[in-house]
Amino acid sequence: MAQIDVALNTGMRKSEQFGLTWNRVYLDKRFVFLDTAKNGHSRYVCLNKRAKAAFMFMKERHDQIGGAKNALVYRADRQRGGLTMFLKKRGSTMLSGTRSDTPQPAVWSCGACILLSCRRSWGTGPCA
């Protein structure tokens, strides 16, 4: 899933990732410009090969539907339940956590790794 690849390979916060518009993504130069980060300042996020590939995949789909240049990278209808549905369809198990409106993180196991989804950030680790 492209949104997970972007999250894990850029270190962007959820709010930065889901508020991102295409006019801030520079695939040819391999960076994303965030005009308002958590500290109130703008910053640049470098894209490694995997993050760039994820953005290129999403950009191809965006261009196919004729999306606007300043449109959100992640459309609202794709955000609702996206991560949860993706993990459930692939047989992942929720180890802890309940709802996204609680401070308790959701911890998922997919067999080879653990995905930690907090309210504002992501994290991974190998299974023990």
Image: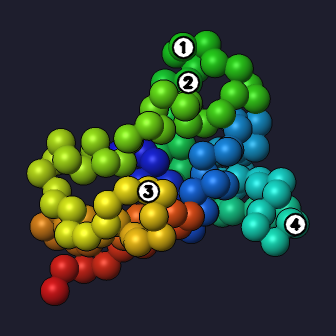
Residue contact between numbered discs 4 and 1, judged by CB atoms under 8 Å? no
SS under mark 3: loop
Location of residue 21 in the rendering, given as x and y in whole percent from the top left corner: 70, 38
For residue 37, above or below residue 78: below
Residue wearing tag 3: 100
Residue wearing tag 2: 62
3D distance between C-alphas at marks 2 and 3: 27 Å
For residue 125, above or below residue 95: below
Spot the residue most to the bottom: 128
> At 25% from the left edge and 80% from the top edge, which residue is drawn?
126
Residue wearing tag 4: 41
Kindly identify the amino acid type of the residue bearing the numbered disc 2. His
Q: Quadrant of residue 86?
A: top left
The total number of labels drawn is: 4
SS under mark 4: loop
SS under mark 1: loop
3D distance between C-alphas at marks 4 and 1: 33 Å
SS under mark 2: helix
